[in-house]
């Protein structure tokens, strides 16, 4: 019976996680800034998530839960490697230009942000671009924090739909 339960768990995990793999891969890339490290982080995250899958509440946001797991895995790896990773000057190539995919994603995102309704665009600019907290954005725009959350959620959903980019 335990083997049958494990197979059921594995099938359920796969069915729930598969639709958000692209989103997770992009998040891993944003954390690591390196494709190979991002793939390693994704694999470590999926392993940890599978082992902790019983903690996920069905009906809740699986992508959000997995992003929290990924952030914790990333931070624990960061701590293990040490806070500062010294790279000898002769091995440092300097800043790398963005990939063509990154440039195209950015262009699509900029265009989609320009098509947002004004009140949605103001929030995206305040929170996602300027780095304001929800509280700061609510105060600056003189709206309740619940309105900030709902408008920002709608704006992000629109941007996901228009660009395929998850952020």
Image (cartoon, rainbow, N blue to C red):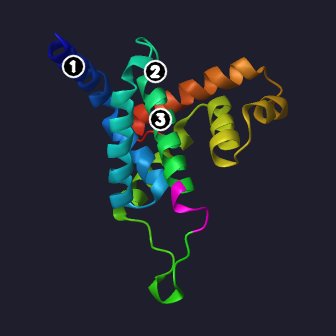
Observer-nearest of 26 and 9: 9
As helix, strand or loop, the secondary structure at mark 1 comes to helix
| Residue that appears at 74% across and 42% down | 132
Q: Is residue 9 left or right of residue 92?
A: left
Sequence-first tag of 2 and 1 = 1
Q: State which tag comes first along the sequence, 3 or 2.
A: 2
- Could you tell me which residue is drawn at 37 percent across and 23 percent down? 53
Mark 3 and mark 1 lie on one chain; the one further toward the N terminus is: 1
Residue 81 belongs to the span the image colors magenta: yes
In front: label 3 or label 2: 3
Which residue corresponds to mark 3?
A: 69
Image-quadrant location for residue 100: bottom left
Q: Give the residues drawn in magenta, as a range.
A: 80-84
> Which one is nearer the viewer's eye here, 21 or 159?
21
Residue visible at 44% across and 19% down? Answer: 55
Residue 110 in view: no
Which of labels 2 and 1 is toward the front?
1
**Magenta-drawn stretch, dominant element (helix, strand or loop):** loop
Secondary element type, mark 2: loop
Within the image, what quadrant is residue 12 found in? top left
Q: Residues within 10 Å of mark 2 (few under 14, many from 20)?
A: few
The quadrant in which residue 118 appears is top right
Q: Nearer the viewer, residue 7 or 25?
A: 7
Residue hosting label 1: 6
Quarter of the rendering occupied by the N terminus:
top left
The residue wearing badge 2 is: 61
Where residue 151 appears, as percent x and y from the top left, is 62, 24
Q: Position of residue 94 (x, y in %)?
A: 51, 80
Q: Residue furthest bottom?
A: 90
* 26 shown above or below 58: below
Secondary structure beneath disc 3?
helix
């Amino acid at each position: 019976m335990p083997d049958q339960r494990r197979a059921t768990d594995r099938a359920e995990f796969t069915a729930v996680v598969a639709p958000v793999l692209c989103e997770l891969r992009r998040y891993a890339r944003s954390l690591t800034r390196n494709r190979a490290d991002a793939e390693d982080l994704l694999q470590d995250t999926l392993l940890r998530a599978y082992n902790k899958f019983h903690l996920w509440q069905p009906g809740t946001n699986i992508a959000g839960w997995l992003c929290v797991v990924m952030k914790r895995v990333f931070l624990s790896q960061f701590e293990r490697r040490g806070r500062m990773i010294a790279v000898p000057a002769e091995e440092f190539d300097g800043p790398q230009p963005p990939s063509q995919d990154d440039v195209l994603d950015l262009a699509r995102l900029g265009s989609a942000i320009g098509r947002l309704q004004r009140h949605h665009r103001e929030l995206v600019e305040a929170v996602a671009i300027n780095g304001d907290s929800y509280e700061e954005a609510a105060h600056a725009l003189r709206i309740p924090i619940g309105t900030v959350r709902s408008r920002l959620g709608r704006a992000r959903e629109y941007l996901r739909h228009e660009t395929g980019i998850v952020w």
